[in-house]
Amino acid sequence: MSRSLNHTEPDTVPQPVAQARRKSVIREYAEAILIAVLLALLIRTFVVQAFKIPSGSMIPTLLVGDHILVNKFLYRFRDPARGDVVVFKYPQDEHRDFIKRVIGVGGDELYIKDRKVYVNCRPPDPACRPIEERWAYYEERFGAGGETFGPVQVPAGSYFVMGDNRNNSQDSRYWGFVKKEKLKGQAFIIYWSWDSERDDKLVWERVRWGRLGHLIY
């Protein structure tokens, strides 16, 4: 004869079993959080790191308020090339990170005259041509006059870097070269951009929507 269910008795789980289940759930959450933290640290250390642009030295390529991602493992497989936008430890204060563009690599001789950059040649040699710099920007308020800089020889294992905003950039023209081991990686994409200077705009109007996902060249 089968036994009827007695609805007056609570359907309970023995206390030791319930406690074990609670401990198991807590342990699973703790392990998941720990794994997530470790993965985030590994990714930040070896793969990709996020940075925010605080100044206008890379205008128009990068604007104040752009948030970018930097590829940290690329230079384990190849050397930086002219034109790469790189993040590095500032040579005069390694607690600060700078972002500039590579203009000269180890062994190059650089010479700057009248807003033109010459690599491994100098005018008035008729065969000498400046490098093509589609990214270079000059603020007109400084006038059309050009500077003269160099020539300088880039040491092996070092780089000559400049900001794209040439009239408003503290770079290798002022504090010298960047050693390869001080490079943190190559900037490759803008994932967020916020116009912090336009307080007159609504929140969603201050997001530079057209810059999101923009690749950095």
Image (cartoon, rainbow, N blue to C red):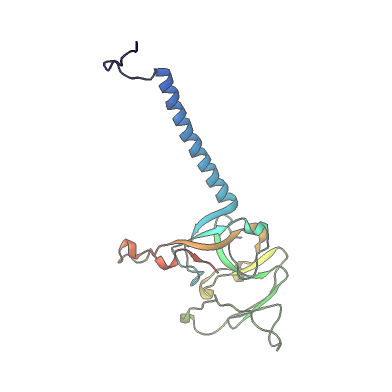
Image coordinates of residue 215 in percent, x first then y, are 52, 66
Q: Is residue 201 left or right of residue 116?
A: left
100 or 83, nearer to the observer:
83
Quarter of the picture holding the N terminus = top left
Name the residue at 47% across, 81% down: 140
Give the total number of marks visible in the rendering. Answer: 0
Can residue 120 be seen here? yes
| Residue displayed at 66% across by 66% down | 159
Q: Residue at x 52, y 73 (%)?
A: 165
Up the image or down, 78 lies above or below 168; here it is: above
Residue that appears at 51% across and 72% down: 168
**Dividing the image into 4 quarters, which one contains the C terminus?**
bottom right
Q: Which residue ends up furthest to the front in the rendered image?
A: 1
Q: Quadrant of residue 187?
A: bottom right
Whole-percent x, y for residue 192 in the image: 44, 61
Residue at the far top in the pictured view: 1
Q: Nearer the viewer, residue 144 or 46?
A: 46
Q: 190 above or below 119? A: above
- Would residue 192 be found to the left or right of residue 47 on screen? left
**In this rendering, is residue 131 above or below 90?**
below
Q: Is residue 122 left or right of residue 214?
A: right
Q: Residue 154 at what x, y percent from top left?
A: 70, 69
- x then y, percent, for residue 138: 51, 78
Using the image as rendered, state which of residue 61 and residue 98 is in the foreground: 61
Q: Residue at the far left: name it.
A: 8
Question: Is residue 5 shown above or below 136?
Answer: above
Can residue 89 be spotted in the picture?
no
Q: Is residue 110 left or right of residue 168?
A: right
